[in-house]
Amino acid sequence: MTIRNIGLIGVGLMGHGIGKNILAKGFALSVCAHRNRAPVESLVSMGAVERETPAEVAAHSELVILCVTGSPQVEEAVFGEKGVIKGARPGLIIADCSTAEPDATVRLAGELAKSDITLVDTPLTRTPREAEAGKLGMMTGGDPGILSRIRPVMDSFADTIIHAGPVGSGHRLKLINNFLSLSHAAIAAEAIAVAAKAGVSMQALKDIVVAGGANSVMFERLIKLPLEGDDSAAKFAIVNARKDLRYYAAMAESQSSAAFLAEQVLQLYSLAVGLGHGERYVPRMVDVMMELRGEK
């Protein structure tokens, strides 16, 4: 059966682009506000219907997409006093686009199955810019039949969709992906800070790095900060980066895997939060590294 009625909970930097593209493909969309009303009002102006609570969103939806911060927020959105479970009908599908703890995702899926509600994990890669353009990357975990059924909706805002395995696998893959990207960002931040203190031209640093094997997507995003004063190439808060690294380290520990580098990178992002940079975007890790060296 074709899905037409979509609910979206978590209309923030990523959620606005997701909702915009869902509407553009002709789906009906229900949303509810949390803190920032601007993206909700924007989507309503495009045809979305605002609902008062997650329960009301679920009552008007066949598929509910969650785009919140992490596992505690997912739990609250689903099982809270006015959560999805209170308005859901049997057969509802929940797609969790958050970056969550895989074990919590598996447990949540089991609880929801008792009410004939299916949870799949569908975490995202890339940035709000790609969300607006409908070109996000997605990792999926769950029943292939359910994922096939919701695929037309996901295709409206993602152009790369990788099935990782059973429920929880999408979140496992996302944590590994984020460990790599956030570690690359930390390395790039340190290199840029050392180069600045050594008097190396930032343009020269960029030119030589992007021409060889030292290059990375995160380096190209971070080097824009000293060259152009632009931190918008990676609109992802440092405090959320710390959360993802904490989830990754916990996942590695739960399976008795060594995570030496992850612990070091986690400590660096934790230090950045402690120094008051938590709400700033990841490219500002360059500022953190400069601050640690007594520089601006």
Image (tube, rainbow, N blue to C red):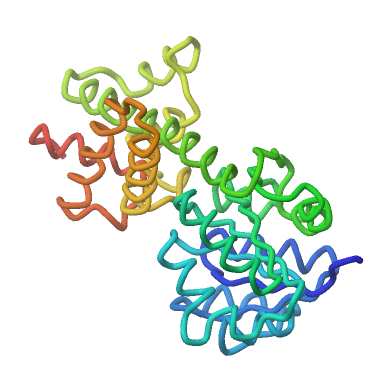
Query: On the rendered image, what quadrant is the N terminus found in?
Result: bottom right
Residue 294 higher or lower than 61, as above or below: above
Quadrant including the C terminus: top left
- Near-viewer residue (133 or 237): 237
**Up-down: is 63 above or below 189?**
below
| Residue for point 42% across, 14% down | 214
Out of 92 and 232, give the one closest to the viewer: 92
Where is residue 51 shown, x and y percent of the image? 63, 87
Task: Tell me which residue sits at (56%, 70%) in the image.
Answer: 11
Q: How many marks?
A: 0
Residue most toward the bottom? Answer: 52
| Depth order, front residue of 76/12 | 76
Figure check: 82 above or below 217: below
Question: Is 75 on the left or on the right of 267, as rendered?
Answer: right
Task: Tell me which residue sits at (69%, 46%) in the image.
Answer: 135
The percent coordinates of residue 31 (x first, y second) are 63, 78
Left or right: 171 as drawn, with respect to 247: right
22 or 101: nearer the eye? 101
Up the image or down, 261 lies above or below 279; here it is above
Residue 88 occupies quadrant: bottom right
Name of the residue lying farthest toward the right: 1
Name the side, left or right, on which 22 lies relative to 191. right
Which residue appears at 74% of the width and 77% of the height? 90
> In the rendering, at what x and y percent does residue 244 appear?
39, 47
Instruction: Tell me if 55 is positioned left or right of 258 in this view.
Output: right
Q: Position of residue 73 (x, y in %)?
A: 44, 68
Q: Residue furthest left?
A: 294
